[in-house]
């Protein structure tokens, strides 16, 4: 693996950089595979029994001995876990150490696709907290929405906006996570092709873009709120220098994090403002290259002049409810048997489909709707036609579905046929809508994978066609 000389030179005096060990770990070809279980779907005690090695800084993170075919694991499609690089799972520690996660919080994950950090954040915040998971690039929002749907939580809103759009939500978020687009040197081991795209010039361009993104988003952070900034780049320009720039430009203070010395994470202190940063080198941790730093916004906002932010939060009046969007009492009656509790939600209709949103987010949804483009909110339940719910896939894999619905547990091969969206042959006395479930052979957990409709002599497969697996 030919690491860029300019990168190696630029790291010579950076704390924790050990050229020989760094080169060796890149040459070794070692690949590390880690997953993070979904605590809302998988019982942690069961995972522990499998004697997988735990990621030291994440309660739900585990290393796998080798890379299986995730595509051929029905529980992957059921949202039992997310395949995530281990170093970046440190976000859990950063949040736990800097934020009171028991409080009802408004959290923004600004650069969210494909959803690794968002699913992590959702697992550590309380049910009364709201996560806004945003991705600016339109073509990447679908995969983000898909991963959020599979994760199953109702307290997430997926948006598709430029960071500058968030100026309309001044002082709104308690926590903002910026997992910034970067030059990507931290992922060279996983993706050697990225080496040819690396250049000093690109590092500079990335640093400028990171500043723009942060300048756009800072007004949306409440006074006293926490900003978590991370990259998968080793370059100081994108890491410690950004921390310096943040402190010089905004009224923020750097937050120190506790790291266990056996974890191998290197604490750095920036040149100018003495900000704390945390570096992950693959020769020191069992994970890829990563940088993370936490900041607290001090009172009375920002230092720089922000023009064009006249759309203050107060002016974002929730629009009057559209009659067409209203869900009738009869329709709610139909929904009752499908949900753990209808009382926990309010319901809206969009293109004839009913969506369930946790009741305490009614105002927030209205505010966010008037400021941003919402790709998805809450859990889509399906459409109600002549007092029958045609249930949506989102409901099947959600955490709000009633556990007492008719289910049929199928073996792995049948589950995979279902996920390929071919007709499956099953023997059952059940009729109508049936939730197909699958249990892993190790007995880990039984999870819904989707709906079928059982008729007199066949059953229809309702797996979303755009998600079907193509792998034979
Ligand atoms: N947080 C994600 C996760 O854990 O799965 C990974 C995010 S990736 C490092 C950075 C993201 O920033 C990408 O999804 C990219 O599309 C997005 N991005 C690119 N340019 C951006 C910009 N100018 N403003 C905000 N986000 C941008």
Image: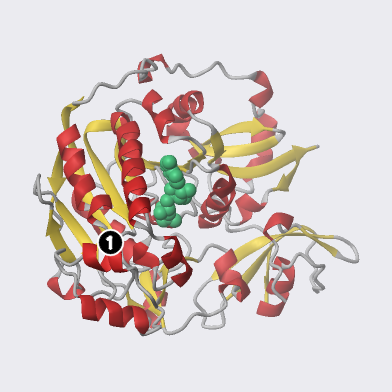
**Quarter-wise, where is residue 163 in the image?**
top left
Dot 1, crowdedness within 10 Å: few (<14), some or many (≥20)? many
Q: Is mark 1 within 8 Å of ligand 1?
A: no
Relative vertical location of residue 256 with respect to residue 223 in this rendering, above or below = below
Could you tell me if residue 368 is visible in this image? yes
Q: How is the image coloured?
A: secondary structure
Which residue occupies 72% across, 75% down?
414
**Quarter-wise, where is residue 465 in the image?**
bottom right
Screen quadrant of the N terminus? bottom left
Which residue occupies 25% across, 59% down?
93
As rendered, which of 184 and 203 lies closer to the eye? 203
As rendered, which of 211 and 45 lies closer to the eye? 211
Residue 298 placement, left or right of 455: left
Residue 212 placement, left or right of 417: left
Q: How many marks?
A: 1
Screen quadrant of the C terminus? bottom right
């Amino acid at each position: 693996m030919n690491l860029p000389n300019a990168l190696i030179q630029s790291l010579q005096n950076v704390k924790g950089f050990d050229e020989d060990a760094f080169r060796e770990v890149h040459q070794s070809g070692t690949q590390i595979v880690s997953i993070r279980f979904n605590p809302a779907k998988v019982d942690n005690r069961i995972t522990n029994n499998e004697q997988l090695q735990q990621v030291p800084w994440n309660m739900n993170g585990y290393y796998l001995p080798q890379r299986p075919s995730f595509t051929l694991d029905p529980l992957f499609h059921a949202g039992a876990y997310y395949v995530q690089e281990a170093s970046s799972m440190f976000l859990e520690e950063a949040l736990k150490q800097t934020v009171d996660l028991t409080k009802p919080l408004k959290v923004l994950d600004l650069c969210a696709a494909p959803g690794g950090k968002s699913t992590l954040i959702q697992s550590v915040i309380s049910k009364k907290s709201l996560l806004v998971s945003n991705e600016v690039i339109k073509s990447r929002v679908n995969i983000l929405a898909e991963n959020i749907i599979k994760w199953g939580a109702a307290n997430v809103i997926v948006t598709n906006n430029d960071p500058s759009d968030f100026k309309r939500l001044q002082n709104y978020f308690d926590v903002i996570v910026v997992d910034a687009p970067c030059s990507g040197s931290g992922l060279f081991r996983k993706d050697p092709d990225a080496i040819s795209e690396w250049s000093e010039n690109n590092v500079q361009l990335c640093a400028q873009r990171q500043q723009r993104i942060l300048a756009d988003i800072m007004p949306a952070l409440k006074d006293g709120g926490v900003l978590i900034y991370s990259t998968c780049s080793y370059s100081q320009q994108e890491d410690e220098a950004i921390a310096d720039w943040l402190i010089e430009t905004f009224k923020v203070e750097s937050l120190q994090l506790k790291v266990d010395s056996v974890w191998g994470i290197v604490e750095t202190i920036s040149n100018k403002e003495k900000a704390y940063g945390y570096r992950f080198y693959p020769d020191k941790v069992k994970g890829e290259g990563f940088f993370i730093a936490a900041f607290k916004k001090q009172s009375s906002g920002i230092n720089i002049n922000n023009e064009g932010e006249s759309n203050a939060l107060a002016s974002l009046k929730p629009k009057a409810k559209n009659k067409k969007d209203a869900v009738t009492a009869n329709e709610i009656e139909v929904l009752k048997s499908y949900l753990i509790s209808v009382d926990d939600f309010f319901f809206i209709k969009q293109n004839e489909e009913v969506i369930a949103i946790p009741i305490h987010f009614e105002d927030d949804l209205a505010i966010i709707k008037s400021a941003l483009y919402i790709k998805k909110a809450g859990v889509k339940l399906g459409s109600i036609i002549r007092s029958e719910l045609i249930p949506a896939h989102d409901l099947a894999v959600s955490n709000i579905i009633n556990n007492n619905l008719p289910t049929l547990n199928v073996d792995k091969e049948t589950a995979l046929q279902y996920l390929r969206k071919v007709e499956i042959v099953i023997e059952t006395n059940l009729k109508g809508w049936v939730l197909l479930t699958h249990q892993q052979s190790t007995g880990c957990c039984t999870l819904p994978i989707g709906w079928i409709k059982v008729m007199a002599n066949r059953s229809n497969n309702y797996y979303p066609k755009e998600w079907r697996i193509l792998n034979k």
